[in-house]
Amino acid sequence: MIVYVRSVVGACSGKPAPESAPRPGSGSSWTSAAGIGTAVSAIVELSDLYRAPETYDVKITLLEVLRGERSMDLLKNATASNGAPREDLEYVLARVRFEFAARGAPGNKTWELEGKQFSAFSGDGKPYENPSAVPPEPLLRGVLRSGNSQEGWLVFAVAREDSKPVMAFSPAGIWFQLF
């Protein structure tokens, strides 16, 4: 089945227009990224070629952020194939809770949650490449049905001197502080 996703709330587009500046910490842009422990919600629309679209709520909470030596230790314990990043980079681990719920009937579509739906950006909004490192267990991955939630780790590589990196969830344009 082919699934199309359209964000009804938010956009992963970078800097907001001056006249519509989001409130600080709302998670609606990289300049107003939500902090650790803040749950941010969005509405997504799922459809396929043969059925009418359905709306679903997603709620994402960044539970924990690890950086530097602590993150490297967890990555080494996850698998021996996890090596150190480039000298100018360091790993950041993010533990995330993802919740998925239908807004109406029939509510029988599924969400395929994958780590590649999340990306890291520098404090000034430039994208980082996703590293090939394997995060520790549990991974943030799975097929969710309405009412399901999943917790797991994501791994990013950011510049050592970047003190305020952020993470975005696409397609809903939800942003979190990785500091």
Image (cartoon, rainbow, N blue to C red):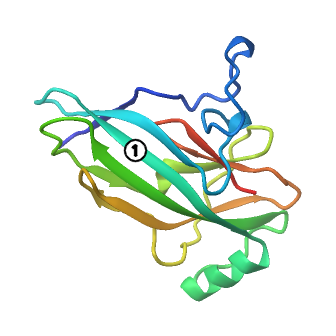
Work out which quarter of the rendered image holds the C terminus and state it: bottom right
Residue at the location (45% across, 70% down)?
Answer: 139
Q: Where is residue 32 drawn, in percent x and y?
A: 70, 36
Quadrant of res 70: bottom right
For the question of whether residue 79 can be seen, the reply is no
Task: Please say if 124 is above or below 81.
Answer: above
Q: Where is residue 85 drawn, in percent x and y?
A: 73, 70
Residue at the location (41% across, 26% down)?
Answer: 8
Classify residue 101 as left or right of residue 116.
left
- Local crowd size for mark 1, using a 10 Å CA cut-off: few (<14), some (14–19), many (≥20): some
Between 34 and 88, the residue placed more toward the observer is 34
Work out which quarter of the rendered image holds the N terminus and state it: top left
Q: Where is residue 87 drawn, in percent x and y?
A: 84, 68
Residue at the location (26% across, 36% down)?
Answer: 103
Classify residue 159 as left or right of residue 103.
right
Residue type at mark 1: give it: Val
Residue at the location (47% across, 40% down)?
Answer: 41
How many marks the image carries: the answer is 1
Name the residue at the right extreme: 161
Give SS at disc 1.
Answer: strand
- Please name the residue that numbered disc 1 is placed on: 58
Q: Where is residue 167 drawn, in percent x and y?
A: 63, 49
Name the residue at the top extreme: 19
